[in-house]
Image (cartoon, rainbow, N blue to C red):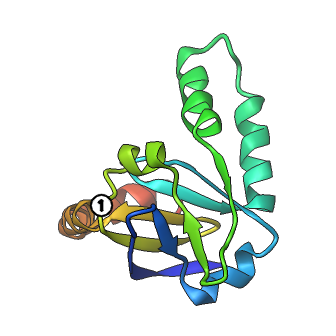
């Protein structure tokens, strides 16, 4: 399970270290893709296969289903770890997420999210201010 929030640097070649505690969970392979809210999603390979299968089974006759499948499937890239526990984030994904020098890696149970630090701080501040209404809406969903 992925949980927690970690700050990491992205070097000039687009490499970023993955938190040590998560590397074991990703040792069988990982996939990075466009996420939501202008962040990247990093999935263990096994989890990605489940998500990719669901996306590929969406009805192609529905525009929003096609858009979501294109967003995530066409944007996906297998990533490998180097000897220092870094992955290379492709330029098109760094551009999509507006990733600069400082990144936040956030654990969200079955995936990691990779955010530009400024974007993460803006999102987090807004979510914290709205936490009561978010909790109320989730209560209606049975959470």
| Residue 50 x, y percent position in the rendering | 79, 50
Residue depicted at x 41% and y 82%: 6
Q: Residue furthest bottom?
A: 21
Q: Residue furthest top?
A: 61
Q: Is residue 76 left or right of residue 67?
A: right
Q: Is residue 110 left or right of residue 15?
A: right
| Residue 53 x, y percent position in the rendering | 79, 40
Circle 1 crowding by C-alpha within 10 Å: few under 14, some 14–19, many from 20: some
Decide which of 139, 52 is in the foreground and name it.
52
Residue depicted at x 65% and y 67%: 110
Residue 66 vs 5, above or below: the answer is above
Secondary-structure class at tag 1? loop
Residue 35 vs 83, above or below: the answer is above
Query: Residue 65's quadrant in the figure?
Result: top right
| Residue 63 x, y percent position in the rendering | 55, 15
How many numbered circles does the render carry? 1
Decide which of 29, 1 is in the foreground and name it.
29
Query: Residue 28's quadrant in the figure?
Result: bottom right
The residue that mark 1 highlights is: 100
Residue depicted at x 72% and y 47%: 51
Query: Residue 43's quadrant in the figure?
Result: bottom right
Residue 42 vs 96, above or below: the answer is below
Residue 2 vs 127, above or below: the answer is below
| Residue 44 x, y percent position in the rendering | 72, 65
Decide which of 137, 52 is in the foreground and name it.
52
Q: Quadrant of the N terminus?
A: bottom right
Residue depicted at x 77% and y 60%: 45
């Amino acid at each position: 399970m992925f949980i927690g929030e970690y700050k990491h640097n992205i070097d000039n070649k687009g490499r970023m270290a993955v938190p040590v505690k998560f590397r074991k969970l990703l040792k069988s392979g990982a996939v990075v893709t466009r996420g939501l809210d202008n962040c990247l999603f990093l999935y263990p390979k096994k989890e990605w296969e489940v998500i990719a299968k669901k996306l590929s089974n969406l009805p192609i006759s529905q525009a929003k289903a096609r858009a979501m499948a294109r967003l995530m499937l066409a944007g996906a890239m297998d990533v490998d770890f180097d000897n220092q526990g870094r992955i290379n984030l492709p330029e098109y994904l760094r551009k999509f997420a507006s990733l600069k020098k400082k990144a936040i890696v956030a654990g969200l149970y079955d995936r990691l999210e990779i955010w530009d630090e400024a974007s993460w701080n803006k999102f987090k501040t807004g979510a914290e201010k709205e936490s009561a209404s978010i909790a109320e809406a989730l209560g209606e969903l049975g959470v």
